[in-house]
């Protein structure tokens, strides 16, 4: 006697309904162990997440969890319901880091279906969801929109009416939030190691971060499992041998975190991520790839009611198996350079001079 | 000058005496770091071990440590004294999870030799031990019987008289224990993601869990070292190159944990392991193997004085490099299917409907 | 527009000035997660760092962080300023473990340039630095001298006058420190598993530790990143393909920790490292190497004002891909045996009998 009903095979395209709210299971309490693993997996050195006294000197009660660790865990919660059957993770928008997450916080995530479009092939469709993560006090700490291409299970299932959500090109400066108690001070360089502040970055400037990091098979498997992201294509090599790529795919979040950590040298004072405006995984990454990073300054904004801290809108480009300084053209009309694996538009908080 | 006496080479068959009590060294305090690593190594998503508010909603003071993490650490303590020279780990019985283990608890283990039988070859013998693990308050949290085949050092050493312990086929429902304060409630599905409760599982039912997980060399090495299990065959590749298998063996506990984590999809409400009734590592596992899992419901029991929670006796079969749904016959008279790596008979606590 | 100034490429030989004090960035708070990872990476079983009740029984407030974990993290802080451009890490001396480090402590490190000598080639030079690590109370917990060979950036840069520091052959017994409250007792063997105490080790004695541990690529990458050591040659495989060794080098600290953990069997009561007197990474280690360890007792010292605990000066030899008992000659006039990867002279605290 076999009971297929017990095994949740995930939703197919025809299972999504516009306006539907999906409460994702398995809330997660974040611990000091998660933070150490994040450092071991990425080499992240941002002292805001590594030094309790430094975090407290900035007005925070404790060192917050790395922004991307919190994001990956929150995101992982949505996978069983949203993207287990995804053909591709097409993009992100309006990712907001509303409040810091601390060790001991418990994150729960829900998603609303905000857009649907069946593909002309009739075999799949695109689903847009807006996900929101709250902590144990029901306060929103993270929210984002993503869209994925999902297979249809029954090809003859009727197509939903097409609804395309209106998405902002970027999170507006007025919507960016920092904790009230978070204040810059004059001794930040001692902890970060850099004298480069908000005023020192110019629109159009490119920083070719020197270091590369090779992603080992176990590294990305550990990361994906730590985030409780159950998308099989990241850790089931037997299944992936029979796929078009022939091997496990590295979870895109692993690449984002590698690039963020590698770009520390040159962005040492970019203490907090405020938003991700857009993101594309331009090419797949596999174990053995070495990731390099290039940053381009897209814009420089003052923040509302803030003279001590400003915002930089940055483009973070992840490049595999080629140092960042060797790449000239990221993208042409024909598409991305074969070595580009990530093109992320994001916004960071960075102290201003003389604050 | 060489001092061989300083290096403990472990006990050989003739070094065990019936009734002897062995106090195992290196007590271990379990931390939040151990729990995070366990999630990263297994992808475990059981919210009882991942969400502090969920654990508290069930009447526990904190989220307990994953049952199998506690077991592997407790078990690891016995390896230097019991099985460093083992030819094979033959079986488990009467494994009982008496009380939850929490972060901050310190586990100490001792073993009693309860059975001895020299093999007819005269080169080795079988040793049965009953091991008991207490926490820092000297309260028993775990106990189990296992038997191992151990080499003789001196072939001419006299054979002990044969004593075979009487072992229960399974831990009886009356012996299963749950903490007094542990209570089910109506909102469990929100955390676990499943509406399948005790009443929904039928004896003979089989669940073919869909996901597989590939075990990387570093994954199982990290796990074995985390458990402070010093059996060299798991992490000394130089030595194992000259063995019959030619490579490192994956510690059997790594396979048990992989299967337990993979079977979450279909057993989401099986919150706590109460007992392991029997277990066999049917074939060895090596790095690169992808583990799949099949569960068969063996029995369904009420628990003494409990209307909110019942027990399921389950058979968890681990299969390498073949999806669970593709295997028909686990075992014939000739023995196990070549791809079967684990056959475990265990008992879980699962809430009842309308509790 | 490219801004090279933003990327810190590290100091070259001509950038060091005698007497200069360098404050290293990114202070680090050590957590329980770091300690669990250290166990998972090394298999360390020293109960002083694994059992809270055992540490307290010895008069400490909590279990201290493994001595080498604290050292590697403190050391990692110096890499961006001292050795990112190092050709080779030539040696250590006068490494002192002044006080235990505990979970929650925040470590900050500074270094003083105490020696300079340009090589006759004119292409590089040797820099000696004395580094000091303090905790959040500004109390010194670690200090050490190391010397590295660093490239010159501009060959025509003038050579500094040569200054060679005077370094002690070993840290004198009178300079070794144990916490005042740290006291031995009669039940230590129960926790460590060994009856061998200070009196049982004789000068000249050699212990061939039996176990070997294979270093996987991911193991050493995780360790190096956990220590926030950003020396690229350990984790950038793309860059290292074009180097003379053709692959990533294992960070020397990983080898030291492997040897220390492997030498537990035979040195179970060597609870605390007091000093590292000298150290050489005799040959490089690569992923896949299996590390074995031989210990030679160099000396046995009483400690000032202590009858309960003495010191052993030990030589710890790391050997790759060859069991310790198979090596006869560690070093000849022609240099080290090809399989020797580490030759470390260090001092441990070990309880005396009947204490």
Image (tube, coloured by chain):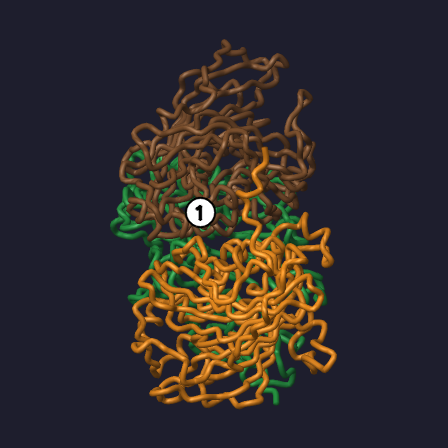
Chain colours: A green, B orange, C brown
Quarter of the image where one finds residue C25: top left
User: What residue is rendered at 52% in x and 53% in y?
Assistant: B225
Residue A15 position in % (x across, y down) = 53, 81
Mark 1 surroundings: few (<14), some (14-19) or many (≥20) residues within 10 A: many
Judged from this view, the residue extending furthest toward the top is: C161
Left or right: A177 in relation to C154: left
State the quadrant of the N terminus of chain A: bottom right
Against A47, residue B105 (above or below) is below
**Foreground of the two, B171 or C86:** B171
Q: Disc 1 on helix, strand or loop?
A: loop
Quarter of the image where one finds residue A202: top left
Left or right: A27 in relation to A252: left
User: What residue is rendered at 52% in x and 46% in y?
Assistant: C265
Q: How many numbered circles does the render carry?
A: 1
Question: Taking the image as drawn, is residue B30 in sight?
Answer: yes
Question: Taking the image as drawn, is residue B292 in sight?
Answer: no
Against C255, residue B337 (above or below) is below
User: What residue is rendered at 35% in x and 83% in y?
Assistant: B186
Left or right: C237 in relation to A34: right
Quarter of the image where one finds residue A46: top left
**Foreground of the two, A62 or C332:** C332
| Residue labelled with disc 1 | C46
State the quadrant of the C terminus of chain A: top left
User: What residue is rendered at 54% in x and 11% in y?
Assistant: C158
Residue C212 position in % (x across, y down) = 61, 46
Residue C71 position in % (x across, y down) = 44, 37
Residue B111 position in % (x across, y down) = 47, 64
Q: Chain of mark 1?
A: C
């Amino acid at each position: 006697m076999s009971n297929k009903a017990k095994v949740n095979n995930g939703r197919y395209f025809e299972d999504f309904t516009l306006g539907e709210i999906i409460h994702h299971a398995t809330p997660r309490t974040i611990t000091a162990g998660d933070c150490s693993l994040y450092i071991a997996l990425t080499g992240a050195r941002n002292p805001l997440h590594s030094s309790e006294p430094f975090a407290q000197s900035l007005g925070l009660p404790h060192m917050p969890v790395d922004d991307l660790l919190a994001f990956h865990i929150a995101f992982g919660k949505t996978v069983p319901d949203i993207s287990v059957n995804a053909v591709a993770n097409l993009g992100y928008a309006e990712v907001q880091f509303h409040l810091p997450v601390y060790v001991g916080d418990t994150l729960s995530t829900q998603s609303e279906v905000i857009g649907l479009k069946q593909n002309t092939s009739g075999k799949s469709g695109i689903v847009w969801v807006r996900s929101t993560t709250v902590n144990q006090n029901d306060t929103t700490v993270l929210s984002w929109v993503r869209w994925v291409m999902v297979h249809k299970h029954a090809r003859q299932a009727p197509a939903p009416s097409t609804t395309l959500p209106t998405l902002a090109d970027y999170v507006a400066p007025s919507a960016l939030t920092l904790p009230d108690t978070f204040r810059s001070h004059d001794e930040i360089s001692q902890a970060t190691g850099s004298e480069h502040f908000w005023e020192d970055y110019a629109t159009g400037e490119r920083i070719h971060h020197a270091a590369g990091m090779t992603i080992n098979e176990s590294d990305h498997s550990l990361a994906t499992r730590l985030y409780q992201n159950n998308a099989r294509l990241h850790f089931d090599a037997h299944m992936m041998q029979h796929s078009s790529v022939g091997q496990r795919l590295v979870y895109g979040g692993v690449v984002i975190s590698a690039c963020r950590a590698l770009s520390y040298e040159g962005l040492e004072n970019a203490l907090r991520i405020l938003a991700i405006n857009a993101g594309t995984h331009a090419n797949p990454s596999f174990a053995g790839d070495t990731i390099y990073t290039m940053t381009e300054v897209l814009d420089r904004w003052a923040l509302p009611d803030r003279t001590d801290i400003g915002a930089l809108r940055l483009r973070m480009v992840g490049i595999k198996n080629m140092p960042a300084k060797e790449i000239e053209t990221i993208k042409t009309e024909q598409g991305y350079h074969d070595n580009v694996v990530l093109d992320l538009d994001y916004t960071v908080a960075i102290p201003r001079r003389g604050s």
